[in-house]
Image: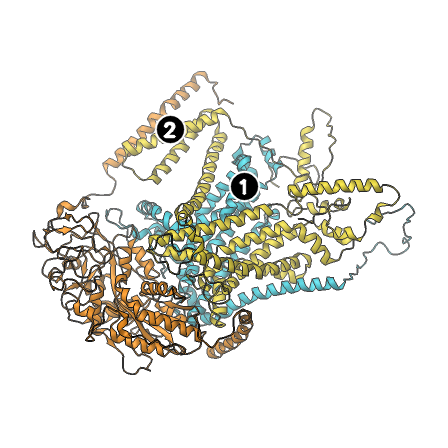
Chain colours: A orange, B yellow, C cyan
């Protein structure tokens, strides 16, 4: 019934389309034999939007016009299925979610960039921003299912021996639109912490199948649409206590720190380009049949459970959905333009992504991507020698250079040794956080000022020593060096109490309620008014009684 | 008519016509002594009552207001700094205001009686409400300009688009050209679709009354309630999803048209209905056909009002974000082809840029908002220049021209004063000219009908330049 | 009114016939006129068709979702159209829309009344025209500009007020905020952001000029004779306003308010910029999280599949019906009132 209705609609639609498009056809030029550059459109993920925007701007000088609208992965896949865009970008594939239909349009997946889903937060202790927060996976899952509600929860304190966390409410902020970031996060929680995630998810009225992957986060938290908006919300001045999940680049862009997440090896790791590259060496990429629909899609269980010390567990690839047929408005020219664009970002485009906060694709995926591009009918193949791409992951022996050169996390980031690195993370890499917890950690034991590697996105790693990686901004000495002035700031001996200018709030007993001083205040106010108003009124009244005639002057 | 009506209407038929009561008031006032002598006044049937200023300001009022202000300020400051642990600007203002009202009432009550005190207090409240609204509204505009003037100082803001401009680029690179181009395309196409249709429809509604026109009017009025987002959704579902016609300026212009059409029709209908029936009757009596009457009399008479209707509809359409959000796509580069490819518009770019957490994008967003405001402001000023006058009301230039022409007519008549009777002079040609407009009656009052007959009398001056 | 041209004209001797009966006037129209009438009628029919097409399409697309959901569409708070019946409905968004509009009206009406009275009764004559133009201009300011103002300027400054209200009036259910604790010095202000209240304030400021300009128009039409009569009987200015202007303008005031309400219900972008969408009935207006039908459409149109679009159409239809009723009531009240006959609204 609905089927026939749809078909009828389509039929009518075609007829009307002819009439409507007639006007534009008159204006258009006849198709030419040689492919020419036309503008192409795509929509989808905001997770990888920063990279796409960069590439878009890069290819613009070659007269390649790419319109991209970051509306969320779900909307992007949807738009592709409906045929309103030429390509889509998504973190999860079609049909990964329960009751999502596979589009009738012919398509293939192509990985475009890697990155880490990070947890950006806005937290201050005594008026100073915390930049070195560490959390273990179950704590994160509990925060985003509402069972840990305060920053000074014992579980969070256990993760952060160096921080005197305030009794402030945690404000988890989630995506309100259909999002691939949400889907990646949910997949991770569902896989790693089903006992925390599933009951909560079910309690929100989601079905068993839906809880595996969800693009729409269940209700109950503050929600914002789009990565940049959610990041902006958390970065807002009155959003203290907020935490959210976004791609690492958004935290860098906003100058905010991200949580170091505990990996299976017992280290708290930041989602730098290196740690993501290490993690994704364990990703299971579907490479069986190049013509299968799920060719090149990812399975991330290996990443979640990787026992490498340097791995960031929430790493994943982002995919572009490319059309494989000239339908839904995809023409020879569009395919040609899309091919040019794809060749660019798969090759040279990967060079700069780590500066943005992503991780470049490894060589095997770049090659696979090249092969996928060829499948778009109308693409003019470019004989681009893959070595010329200058991708930082490429090496002569076929291993992932970025992963190979990644340095081990410093010992102060190991779980359970009572220390906490003070170096900042994410966009706040230059801002270390002093040890504020005088009770635990002890004096001198928090001497963890060894810089975390790659905090500034240094791809090669100039220092290859596994324990200490001196960079420009962090010295391995006992003091911290201000990156701007070169002066030693902070003594780094763990006490650091004198660093705090603002006082730490202390709750007083008996706050609130009506007390004597309130009564006194009201009395004082009344006395003041009586003093001002009383004399003339009394005088006037007595004047009236004396003369008896004084009325209002007219 | 309320029982407090000041004039005791002598006749049995109470009337609301303002002109009558004015005359009666005048008569009642001029009467003195025992025998009432009505002054001989030239009855001007279309004399409109004019409100007179009756208010006076006395020194005591000023003293009371100033005194209360000072007292309120002092007391509140004392409270805030010495007596109570209050803080916050808002609290200070509110408390100070309440104190002011109290003191003011008290001061006035020293001199005046109850009703006068109430009058003064309400006066103070109304004044402050008026100022508050105007201040807030001014704040909305000024804030936008204050935040957005920086990008506007760079010329590239109007000559470049955002295709290669990232958040880190300085304001000397990138601009809102794509948005301006898109907006102009969309509103231009929308006007192309709506204006002829709306004008024809409005003419139909007022010139060919009947059941059909009543139906159309009802439906058009109902559609003014259509939320703009629903108009956008309609076009999104039909043109983009069902017809497979991609996002483009054309789709947006359709959405804006759906939204603007009923608004313009309604406004134009009101304006055309205000054209005095006497003008139409005069034209018809002179033998003009209906379309000539409409073309040469009705439309020119209502021209300024129609233009205003269109311009205000344009201002409304140009500022709408939600239909654009659903149908334009959101391009970052200039697209000169409105029929193919994504596009953008000023409100959508404003929305998109300010959603970003990037400071530089937000500033640019305010810049586009300021540009949009300037555009709306220009349209508004334009509407005020051409419009703001009722049908038949003439501008100064037109008045001068009319005087010139009638002077010419007088000399012509004087020259012809001899044999040929005046009837001969009125050939078919003047019939197609518009009859001279009587001063505009108040909308909707019975005025138009009342002096319909005298309006036809003298040979009229034309009004063709509108 | 037959003109008597010359003295020679005699009255026709029709006295013998039947009494002066109205004669049938025969219209004879030329080709051009017929063409004109056909064209005008055609224009009307085209407009009618367009409007009916929009309305009909709205109904047509909505009926799929309405058929699936049935009455649960009105009672369900969630929004998950792909999950089938009982999983999507407008209970939450419609309530949210009404709440935002109510806040807007509560803010706008006193302000607009005050400003309208000021402009029409108190303002010096010299600046009156300027003020009128200013208010009319403000009514034309795009809503995205109000949204900017609300998001970047108003929201941060209104949190303190929200905090104050919930601290002292939190016992009134709608002012309650779940996670707020006035005694907690570290309590976060985020619980007050993105709320119905903030969105309502912004929309209220947006509709104030619209309401104000209608009220001002009506107030200024109060008959001067009656005004002066009131003065002559010794009324103060306020007495005159209460006895003459307000009763005269009552219809216009109500009608203008309803018209503002119609605009508030349909407002989209300013609300989208402010709120954090929730899909449950949110009766606490100061609390983070609000919803509105228009915002729902703007936020979800892209994510929606066939079923979702249909559900959005159903929501849009509900919104349309609501604004339609409000607008019709408004024009009815205006038309019936004493001042209404003269009003262009």
Q: Position of residue B99 (x, y in %)?
A: 38, 33
Q: Which residue occupies 72% across, 38% down?
A: B44
Residue at mark 2? B71
Task: Name the subunit of mark 2.
Answer: B
Q: From the top left corner, tell me how far across and down residue C113 is, in percent.
A: 49, 43
The answer to whether one can see residue B208 in this image is yes
Q: Residue B442 versus residue A408: which sits nearer the camera? A: A408
Q: Position of residue A225 (x, y in %)?
A: 35, 61
**Who is closer to the viewer here, C226 or A361?**
A361
Q: Is residue A292 left or right of residue A313?
A: right
Relative to A511, is C135 on the left or the right?
right
Asked if labels 2 and 1 share a chain, the reply is no
**CA gap, disc 2 and disc 1:** 33 Å
Name the residue tied to disc 1: C246
The answer to whether residue A96 is seen in the rendering is no
Quadrant location of residue A375?
Answer: bottom left
Examine the rendered structure and indicate whether residue B221 appears above or below residue A311.
above
Q: Position of residue B431 (x, y in %)?
A: 77, 52
For disc 2, the neighbor class at 10 Å (few under 14, some 14 to 19, many from 20) is: some
Q: Provide the secondary structure element on which disc 1 rests.
A: helix
Q: Determine the chain carrying the residue at label 1.
A: C
Q: Give the image quarter of residue A191.
A: bottom left
């Amino acid at each position: 019934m609905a089927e026939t209705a749809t078909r009828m609609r389509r039929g009518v639609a075609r007829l009307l389309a002819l009439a409507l498009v007639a006007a534009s056809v008159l204006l258009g030029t006849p198709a030419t034999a040689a492919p020419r550059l036309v503008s192409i459109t795509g929509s989808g993920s905001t997770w990888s939007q920063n990279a796409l925007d960069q590439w878009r701007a890069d290819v613009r000088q070659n007269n390649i016009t790419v319109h991209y609208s970051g509306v969320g992965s779900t909307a992007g896949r949807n738009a592709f299925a409906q045929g309103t865009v030429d390509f889509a970008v998504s973190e999860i594939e079609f049909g990964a979610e329960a009751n999502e239909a596979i589009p009738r349009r012919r398509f293939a997946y192509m990985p475009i960039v890697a990155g880490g889903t990070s947890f950006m937060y806005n937290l201050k202790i005594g008026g100073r921003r915390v930049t070195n927060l560490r959390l273990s996976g179950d704590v994160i899952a509990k925060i985003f299912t509402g069972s840990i509600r305060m920053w000074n929860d014992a579980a969070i304190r256990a993760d952060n021996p160096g921080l005197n966390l305030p009794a402030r409410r945690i404000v988890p902020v989630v995506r309100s639109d259909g999002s691939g970031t949400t889907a990646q996060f949910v997949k991770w929680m569902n896989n790693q912490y089903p006992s925390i995630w599933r009951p909560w998810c079910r309690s929100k009225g989601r079905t068993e199948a839906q809880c595996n992957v969800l693009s729409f986060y269940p209700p109950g938290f503050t929600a914002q649409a789009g990565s940049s908006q959610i990041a902006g919300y958390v970065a807002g001045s009155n959003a203290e206590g907020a935490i959210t999940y976004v791609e690492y680049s958004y935290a860098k862009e906003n100058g905010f720190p991200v949580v170091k997440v505990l990996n299976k090896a017992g280290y708290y790791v930041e989602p730098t380009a290196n740690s993501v590259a290490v993690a994704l060496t364990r990703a299971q990429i579907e490479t069986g049949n190049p013509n299968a629909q799920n060719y090149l899609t990812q399975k991330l269980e290996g990443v979640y459970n990787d026992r490498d010390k340097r791995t960031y567990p929430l790493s994943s690839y982002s995919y572009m959905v490319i059309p494989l047929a000239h339908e839904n408005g995809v023409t020879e020219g569009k395919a040609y333009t899309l091919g040019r664009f794809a060749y660019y970002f798969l090759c040279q485009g990967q060079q700069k992504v780590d500066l943005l906060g992503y991780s470049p694709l490894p060589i095997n995926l770049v090659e696979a991507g090249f092969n996928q591009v060829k499948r778009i009918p109308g693409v003019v193949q470019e004989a681009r020698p893959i070595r010329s791409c200058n991708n930082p992951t490429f090496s002569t022996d076929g291993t992932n250079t970025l992963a190979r050169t990644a340095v081990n996390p410093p010992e102060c980031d190991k779980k359970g040794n009572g220390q906490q690195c003070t170096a900042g993370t994410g966009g706040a890499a230059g801002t270390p956080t002093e040890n504020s917890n005088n009770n635990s950690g002890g004096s001198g034991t928090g001497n963890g000022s060894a810089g975390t590697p790659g905090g500034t996105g240094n791809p090669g790693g100039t220092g290859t020593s596994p324990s200490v990686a001196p960079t420009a901004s962090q010295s391995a000495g006992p003091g911290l060096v201000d990156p701007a002035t070169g002066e030693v700031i902070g003594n780094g001996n763990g006490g650091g109490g004198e660093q705090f200018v603002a006082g730490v709030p202390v709750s007083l007993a008996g706050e609130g309620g009506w007390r004597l001083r309130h009564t006194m205040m009201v009395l004082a106010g009344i006395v003041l008014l009586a003093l001002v108003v009383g004399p003339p009124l009394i005088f006037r009244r007595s004047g009236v009684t004396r003369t008896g005639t004084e009325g209002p002057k007219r | 008519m309320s029982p407090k009506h000041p004039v005791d209407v002598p006749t049995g038929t109470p009337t609301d016509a303002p002109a009558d009561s004015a005359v009666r008031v005048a008569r009642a006032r001029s009467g003195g002594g025992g025998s009432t002598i009505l002054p001989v006044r030239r009855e001007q049937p279309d004399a409109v009552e004019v409100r007179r200023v009756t208010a006076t300001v006395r020194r005591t009022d000023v003293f009371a207001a100033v005194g209360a202000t000072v007292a309120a300020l002092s007391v509140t400051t004392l409270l805030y700094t010495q007596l109570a642990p209050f803080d916050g600007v808002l609290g200070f203002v509110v408390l100070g205001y309440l104190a002011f009202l109290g003191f003011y009432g008290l001061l006035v009550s020293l001199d005046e009686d109850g009703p006068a005190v109430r009058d003064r207090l309400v006066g103070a409240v109304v004044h402050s409400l008026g100022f508050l609204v105007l201040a807030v509204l001014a704040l909305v505009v000024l804030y936008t300009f204050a935040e957005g003037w920086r990008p506007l100082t760079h010329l590239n803001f109007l000559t470049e688009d955002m295709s290669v401009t990232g958040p880190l680029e300085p304001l000397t690179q990138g601009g809102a050209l794509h948005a301006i181009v898109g907006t102009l395309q969309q509103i231009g196409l929308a006007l192309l679709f709506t204006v002829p249709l709306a004008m024809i429809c409005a003419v139909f509604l007022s010139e060919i009354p009947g059941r059909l026109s009543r139906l159309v009017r009802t439906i058009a009025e109902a559609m003014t309630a259509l939320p703009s987002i629903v108009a956008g959704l309609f076009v999104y579902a039909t043109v983009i999803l069902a017809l497979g016609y991609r996002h483009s300026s054309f789709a947006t212009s359709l959405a804006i048209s759906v939204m603007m059409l009923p608004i313009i029709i309604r406004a134009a209908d009101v304006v055309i209905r205000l054209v005095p029936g006497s003008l139409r009757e005069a034209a018809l009596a002179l033998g003009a056909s209906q379309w000539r009457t409409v073309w040469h009399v009705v439309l020119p008479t209502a021209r300024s009002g129609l233009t205003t209707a269109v311009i205000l509809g344009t201002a409304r359409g140009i500022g709408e974000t939600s239909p654009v959000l659903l149908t334009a796509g959101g391009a970052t580069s200039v697209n000169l082809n409105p029929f193919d490819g994504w596009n953008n518009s000023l409100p959508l770019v404003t929305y998109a840029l300010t959603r970003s957490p990037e400071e530089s994008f937000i500033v640019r967003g305010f810049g586009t908002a300021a540009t949009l405001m300037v555009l709306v402001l220009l349209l508004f000023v334009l509407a005020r220049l051409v419009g703001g006058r009722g049908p038949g009301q003439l501008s100064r230039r037109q008045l001068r021209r009319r005087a010139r022409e009638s002077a010419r007519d007088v000399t012509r008549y004087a020259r012809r004063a001899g044999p040929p009777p005046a009837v001969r002079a009125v050939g078919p040609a003047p019939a197609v000219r518009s009859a001279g407009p009587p001063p505009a009656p108040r909308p909707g009052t019975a005025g138009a009908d009342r002096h319909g007959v005298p309006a036809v009398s003298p040979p009229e001056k034309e009004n063709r330049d509108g | 009114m037959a003109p008597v041209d010359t003295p020679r004209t005699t009255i026709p001797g029709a006295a013998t016939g039947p009494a002066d009966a109205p004669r049938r006037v025969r219209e004879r129209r030329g080709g051009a006129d017929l063409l004109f009438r056909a064209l005008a009628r055609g224009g009307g029919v085209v407009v009618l068709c367009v409007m009916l097409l929009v309305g009909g399409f709205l109904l047509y697309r909505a009926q799929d979702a309405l058929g699936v959901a049935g009455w649960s569409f009105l009672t369900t708070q969630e929004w998950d159209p792909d999950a089938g019946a009982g999983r999507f409905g407008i209970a939450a968004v419609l309530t949210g829309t009404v709440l935002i509009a109510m806040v807007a009206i509560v803010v706008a009406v006193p302000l607009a009344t005050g400003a309208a009275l000021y402009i029409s009764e108190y303002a010096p004559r010299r600046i009156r025209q300027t003020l009128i133009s200013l208010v009319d201009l403000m009514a034309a300011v795009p809503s995205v500009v109000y949204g900017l103002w609300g998001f970047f300027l108003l929201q941060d400054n209104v949190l303190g007020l929200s905090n104050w209200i919930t601290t002292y009036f939190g016992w009134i259910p709608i002012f309650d905020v779940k996670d707020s604790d006035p005694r907690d010095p570290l309590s976060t202000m985020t619980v007050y952001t993105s709320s119905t209240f903030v969105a309502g304030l912004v929309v209220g400021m947006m509709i104030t000029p619209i309401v104000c300009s209608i009220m001002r128009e009506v107030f200024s039409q109060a008959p001067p004779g009656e005004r002066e009569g009131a003065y002559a009987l010794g009324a103060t200015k306020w007495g005159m306003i209460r006895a003459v202007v307000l009763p005269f303008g009552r219809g216009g005031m109500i009608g203008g308010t309803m018209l503002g309400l119609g605009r508030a219900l349909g407002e989209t972008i300013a609300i989208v910029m402010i709120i954090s969408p929730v899909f449950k009935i949110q009766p606490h207006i100061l609390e983070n999280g609000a919803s509105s039908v228009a915002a729902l459409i703007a936020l979800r149109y892209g994510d929606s599949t066939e079923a979702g679009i249909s559900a959005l159409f159903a929501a849009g239809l509900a919104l349309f019906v609501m604004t339609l009723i409000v607008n019709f009531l408004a024009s009815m009240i205006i038309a019936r009132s004493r001042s209404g006959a003269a009003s262009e609204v």
